[in-house]
Amino acid sequence: MSVRTRVPARVAATTATGWSAALAALLVVSCAAGVAIGAADLSIGTVVESIAGRLGIGPGTDLLTTHIVVDLRLPRVLAAALVGAGLALCGAVLQSLTGNALADPYLLGMSGGASLGAVLALTAGVGTVGFLGMGAVSVAAFVAALGSLLLVFLISTSRSGALLPGRLVLAGIAVGQFAAAVTSALVLLGDRDAAHRVLQWTLGSVAGVRWSGLVTITVVVAVTTVVMLAHARVLDSFAFGERAAASLGTDVERSRWVLYGVASLCTAALVAQAGVIGFVGLVVPHAARMLVGPLHARLLPVVALVGAVLLVWADIVARTVLPGRELPISIVTAVVGVPVFVLLLRRRGARS
């Protein structure tokens, strides 16, 4: 009996390790391609030589090539990988916490709040001075996202201090819709130039991320990853319901507050830096579960890697598919995400 139960577990662990290794290698190749591909195509050797030169290891390349590689493309590509990983992780955790297969990182109304903050900053014509590597618009978006999150938590918390998942989802929808309505009104009342800037921001892009902003993104995603991996068994217990989780020794309320809080803060920080990027946090967790199963200790690393690879290539497509123009990254993720999501739904329906 014990042999039969251990062998599948070992096989599943080996499969998860294999997928993680393969995806990590694919991510490295994808990042190298992302730095090399662009309006000025470069070879991988030139990319390596430029980075080595900036680090003082070799002679390097000319100043223009080094600037393109090190100052423009490399932070952009790394930001795409980190944002993709962070959004995918937040989506996976929120789907597990709420038991809602359609949950994504923007479930709690933060995308609407962040958009409202960005619109207020853009229409007010604020300067570029920011905080912690974020520009003024990003700071406004982050503060507004936190404000909407606090409002959602206030609405959905019972008198005893318990966080009610059903009320949380409804409050997030209500706050998000209200913020979206105010945002639309501000755009309609503003000038055309402001409306164009607002549209570009709300559709998402990592084009403006530089090394100072990348540090903030790295810290946020790293902390989020550590906290979520530390709660992997807790997330597994939520699959059986709250009562079953409590019977297994899980402090349901504390775990819920910690995980909702971390996922929300991570999403707010990523939205503030890159705008609203859809479908990554919704589709990637479902695809990863098909590869390695539902156990979060194996699932979360794969989710992060798949999200990172997806957004790196979405950014590459966004800036190369149209000569002389750059598409918002959310258009690319939607074009890829919708067919994949439909395929996943059909496969799940066929199995059931």
Image (spheres, rainbow, N blue to C red):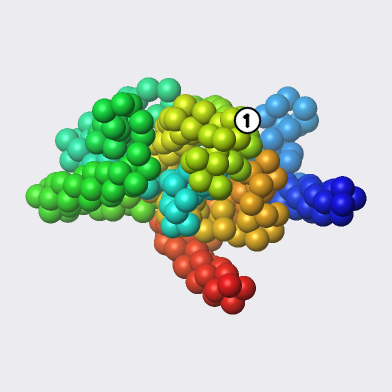
Q: Could you tell me residue 147's position as x and y percent?
A: 27, 31
- Comparing 110 with 94, the one in front is 94
Q: Residues within 10 Å of mark 1 (few under 14, many from 20)?
A: few
Q: Could you tell me residue 82's position as x and y percent?
A: 56, 40
In the image, residue 121 sits, relative to residue 343, either above or below, namely above
Residue at point 26%, 28% (across, down): 159
In the image, residue 347 sits, relative to residue 291, either above or below, namely below
Can residue 219 be seen here?
yes
Name the residue at the left extreme: 189
Horizontal side of 268 relative to 141 (left or right) equals: right
Residue at point 51%, 66% (across, down): 341
Q: Could you tell me residue 276's position as x and y percent?
A: 38, 48
Name the residue at the right extreme: 3
Amino acid beneath label 1: Ala
Residue at point 28%, 48% (across, down): 170
> On the image, which quarter does residue 55 sit in?
top right
Name the residue at the top extreme: 131
Residue at point 61%, 43% (across, down): 236
> On the image, which quarter does residue 284 sit in?
bottom right
Can residue 87 be seen here?
no
Instruction: For mark 1, give the secondary structure.
Output: helix
- Comparing 262 with 183, the one in front is 262
In the image, residue 342 sits, relative to residue 307, either above or below, namely below
In the image, residue 274 sits, relative to residue 287, either above or below, namely above
What residue is shown with label 1? 230
Q: Could you tell me residue 60's position as x and y percent?
A: 72, 34
Horizontal side of 19 relative to 79 (left or right) equals: right
- Comparing 144 with 94, the one in front is 94
Quadrant for the C terminus, please.
bottom right
